[in-house]
Image (cartoon, coloured by chain):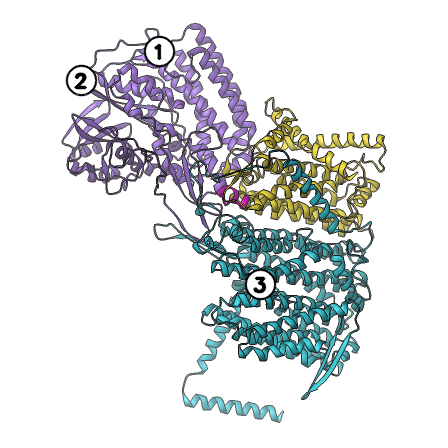
Amino acid sequence: MNNSPAWLQELSAWGTSSRMLQDRILLVTVAPEHWAQLAPEASVRQLRFAGLWADVRDEKLEVNACLARDGWYVLLRATPLDGTMGLPSWARWYPAADRMQRHAHDLWGVRFGECNPPWTRHGAWKADEAPLRTPVTPQERGRDRYPFATFSGEGVYEIPVGPVHAGIIEPGHFRFSVAGEDILGLEERLGYVHKGIEWLACGRKPAALLPLASRVSADSTVAHSWAAALALECALGIAPTARGVVLRGFLAERERIANHLGDVGAICGDVGFAFAKMQCSRLREEWLRCQHGIFGHRLLMDCIAPGGVAVDLDAGHIRLLRANHRDMLQRWQNIAPILTDYPPLQDRLLNTGRLSTVAARGLGVSGYLARASGLSLDVRHDRPQPPYDRHPVQPCLQQRGDVAARLQVRMAEISASVRLLDALLDDLPPGPIQEPWPPGMAAEGVGVVEGFRGEIVTHVRLDDQGNVARFFPRDPSWFAWPALEVLVGGNIVADFPVCNKSVNASYSGCDL
Amino acid sequence: MLPLQILLFALAAPLLNGWVDMLRARLQNRRGPSPLQPWRNLRRLFAKEPVVPHTASWLFRMAPYVMFAATLLASSALPMLTVQTPLASVTDVLVLTGFLTLARVALMIGSLDPGTAFGGLGASRELMLSALAEPTLLLGLFSLAMTAHSSNLAVLVGHLLDTGMMLRPSFLFTLLALLMVAGVENGRLPADNTTTHLELTMVHEAMVLEWSGRHLALVEWSGHMKLLFYGILLADLFAPWGLADHASPAMLALALLCLMGKLAALGVVLALTEALLPKMRLFRAPGMLNLAFLLAVLGLFSHVILEHNP
Amino acid sequence: MLAMGLAMAAGLSAAGPRSWERLALQLLGASGLCSLAAGLWLLLGGPSDAVVMTLGVIPWHLILDPLSAVFLLPLGAVVSTIALYARPYLLHIETGFRRPGVATGFFVASMILVLLAAHAFPFMLGWEGMALASYLLVIQHHEESASRQAGLIYLLVAHMGALVLLLAFGLLAHGAGGPDFAQWRAAPASASAMAALALACLAFAAKAGLVPLHVWLPLAHPAAPSHISALMSAVMLKIAIYGMVRLCFDLVSVQSALGLAVTMITTGALSMVLGVVLALVQQDIKRVLACSSIENLGLVTMALGLALLYRTTGHAMLAAMALGAALLHVLNHALLKALLFLGAGTIQQACDTYDLGRMGGLLRRMPASGGLFLLGCLGLAAIPPLNGFASEWLLFQAALQSWQMEQGILRSLIPLAAACLALTTALGTACLLRLFASAFLGQARSRPARRAREAPRAMLLAQGMLAALCVLSGLFPGLLLMMLNQVTVALLHHPAVQTASALIITPVTATQASYAPLAVLAVIMIIALCTAALLHTRKRAALRRVQPWACGLGPPTARMQITPAALAMPLRQVFAGLLSIHERLGSPQGRRYHLEIADRTWDLLYAPVARFVMSLSRHAARLQSGRVRLYLGFSLGTLLVLLWVMSW
């Protein structure tokens, strides 16, 4: 606490008690009547909103909000008064909090402010029921009337897109209000792939939590399971083995490259540039096949284990991987200049879907979305946990905030990550890959990892038997979706798909 | 003779599209479908039960037939293998463009009829593109007709065949303009993308979303025929060599070979363009069409001022 | 016989006030039929008829020649059909028939008078009567300020035009030595005649609504009841064309009208393009039609300009072709526009609005009206084999023959004209498609549109008659051209097309171009029917009705379909330079979208003039200080100036 920044001390002064959960992660318990003031207080101190979720401990409902700045994380915890079951809404200061509050309301029954429109519920249970606190009576899903924001005026009409899309993508509904081609407003409606992850996690053994965490969003399976593992390890106070940590970083970087390759191809494909799409698809496919050969799974699912990793590399593997990296780098360096120097493509991407630095900061986005808009946010840089403490990462920054900038950031990260992979292999220490798991106890922890989309914050609480009592993985998509609504404004309808691809938020990641 | 040409044209039309699809796939390092794939698609669609929205009127069901017949009529008036065509005495190039317009109007009416968002979106874009492409086509044909002093297709093509290919500025301008128009009218890159699944970016494809079964088959078939129509039109006007001037079997066979060669070459050009270019912004497309229109006007100007030969 | 046409109309104006509605309408219809019969009789070979009456001091020289007969045809057809249409239509208008009835009769009679006049006095009388009667019809809904304003602007333009025309006629009468048309015809070419011609053409251009004198037209036509709009748009505007043809090709013998021809071509081209762009963005169904009239009148003017150009350069045969195209388009446009205006009236009755944004889905509620309206739209959009296409085709053919002209500079006008024509044709198609789709396709956008009912039979019959005429003249343009040949032979000594039979038209020779709409239609029908027959065999005729696709969110609502404004938006964006477009988002919560589209001519041309006049009057107002001494001073000054003038 002594070397903590001034803003942190000011903020923790609001709390009734505070304690360090982990290095630079502070838990502050606050009184419910202070909840409303905390948002503006945090906002003026330029704290980024990083998540909000409810929990029930000792029969008491409590709400956790996570705020972050400069690699520090503050967990604010308040218990709503019994009579009201509610807290003031933070949406005015942190717009991105709105949907997380509605999610918490639908599942835990905690009310935020006056108006709590449905988000996850989709008419599957009654508005006053909370499936994660009390059993509910399932009801027939009627045609629920979701209150979309409507625009009026001559010539305005609505374009409904989804939840069933023409391509192979996840379900989600987009409602455009347009005047001809110009988008006046976009509203998303998600929740079609609500899987009940939070409920499924309850009562699991810690080791059984990781397979579930791997499946929160399959494209970030490594990052999510790493974050869950970190949270568990933080709760129980153990450290993963040295070899395990490097291998985790290795897997995470491979995942980043695979996804970035897919995104780069998809962005080009959406503007009809089939050449780049095909080349990137091919690179990604070869990359995934290599992963399947060595780690047993194309997407590296279930490779992370508590206390380390579940897979190990021998000398043969390492040789194969080095060849793979060399190959990849060489081919990538053939393709990348074409994408950056081809005027017809750049003409399409420049100034499309701009997210200004101010808007990006206000929405609390992270990952490439933030870095393309000039915000230097990268967990690997801001919180250099092993193995990034020995292999420092410089965030790849762009200022324009348009689709082209997001493409640039991804392309730069692909090259940087391939080099990082080689460095990690050079540095791979010998030793065991897993730490033995200690007996369970009541504890809680938070894990923060930079996935390919951005910062993942996972909170895990264990009960007295050491079983999981609460698991909340906060995917970066919670912030990317609102950012998409903002950045398409003023664009034309025909440019939406490429804007959407450049954001590439996960449906599954927030439809828990 | 007329039914024969109509039949031949209709049957051959899907092959050109199949050829272009295959070439494009090869250019993208894919194996790609067989050139017969459009045929298989049509057969599959014809076998399917058509589904019609509740909100659609009789126009929705009639539109594919009108579109099909109008496109086929326009195509059958073109000199395909012989210079003489059966319909040359009752239509001319200007009437042809009129029938292409009829086909397009039928398509747009059909797409607007069910009152869905995508149909309207596609129609509004098509309205913009076609309103700029159509005058270019008309003007290009008009300036070629000026050189031959005739808009009768047989006479026009005969004249071009007789005078030989002189490198005239008007021809060059017109060729460029018509090439751009042909690309846009067939929903090709960079103005539209035939292969996309993204409804919000579609032009032509968004309009046909509500049709199914035999209706969709007719619409798709009309699309194939339109591509072949433009192929043959360009071949007739800018490379008329090999056309038979009387209908002897040997001449016809030679003409068929020549035509196939020319269309194959045109397919290569189209596939290359599509492989190389990304789709342009929607509101850049009018710029391209304005350029095409300007080129057509320039072609006409350079004809009346530089190449005047009464 | 021709007196009968007049008498009927005149009798009608007397009958009107006594609320003998049925009789009045029958009289109106009869006058229309008479005009039609007279026109046909003459064109099918009857002798021309001349009447000279003297009523007071005015000599009523009236004559029916082929040119008047050609213009009598659409007049007759439209007047007789609106007589049929008006009764059920007017039942729904509170004012009833009385007030418009008098004016309508008067209006028709004046138009017939103008067409038949062979003397400057009856011509001017008819011309002014036409303007006044139509003014009364425009301010029909005088309780609305928009209506009154439209009427005021209309009256202003009409009277400025009449003044200019009077001046022109004065010049001509002075040069020829008398106001009789026969005298004018005999007069030699002179500079004053040329000036008079230019002035008269200016007046006619104002009446025809050519750019930049078009601003009254989109205001005035929609203000009148629909059948009157039909009359105004389909017939009255054509009277201006009649004036142009009569003066340019018949009365005034100017050998070198090159400047006039070029002006007509450019004005026509401008009107075409601006008219169609304006029509594309209108939200009011009758304004769309009115703006489309600007476009079509521009086309006719351009054709006339082309004819004049050909005549001036000594190609009388080509001039005849262009004139034939112009006259054919006059006939076709009159029929089509009348059909569409009557259709607009029908829609208005069903939906209680002229706003396209409150219609939609009417085709399923009103199939017959929808079919007829579609026919009109397709015809006006120049879709073969309907009639609008025939006249545009002929105009293209006339332009195609421009290689016969020797002067390169004049020849280079042709590409410009052809480019504008091509652009206008395409934009016209877009505009009419939007019109039809917004009103009849999709889902209903308002409650009245959801409950719309099919129109009464008489209204449908009236439209059906016009539609039948459109189809016939589209399929057999040769028959019309055979009649028009008489006009061109009379005026230019050449037929409009060399070969015109019922089935095929060949403007010059068969190797240059020919067009046989019926044969083409037959082929297209055979293909379509064969395809349909092939596909409907076996058990495949069945089809399944489903909800339209809304991406899995249930059936789409009426809000989820494109709006008329949105349908035109991409195209509007392309032509944004010609329009002044203001878009903004306003309260509440920035969720109300405002869109204003206006004609830039107001800003660019009329507003500066208005500002100038206003500032002038402000300066003038300084004189009015209200001090008696100053006024005395003014009087003294005036007196002195007058004395000086007198003495000088």
Badge 1 element: loop
Q: Which is nearer the N-term, disc 2 or disc 1?
A: 1
Q: Which chain is purple?
A: A
Density class for disc 3 (Cα within 10 Å; few <14, some 14-19, many ≥20) is some
Residue B99 makes an appearance in the image: yes
Quarter of the view holding residue A45: top left
Chain name for mark 3: C
Q: Residue at x 43, y 5 (%)?
A: A315
Is A135 left, or right, of A298 in this rendering? left
What color was chain B assigned in the picture?
Answer: yellow
**Rendered image: mark on residue A310:** 1
Q: Amino acid at mark 1?
A: Ala
Chain name for mark 2: A
| Towards the viewer: C45 or A100 | C45
Q: Amino acid at mark 3?
A: Ala
What color was chain C assigned in the picture?
Answer: cyan
Above or below for C632 versus C172: below
Measured Cα–Cα span from mark 2 to mark 3: 88 Å
**Rendered image: mark on residue A464:** 2
| Towards the viewer: A49 or B29 | B29
Quarter of the view holding residue C317: bottom right
Residue that mark 3 sits on: C458
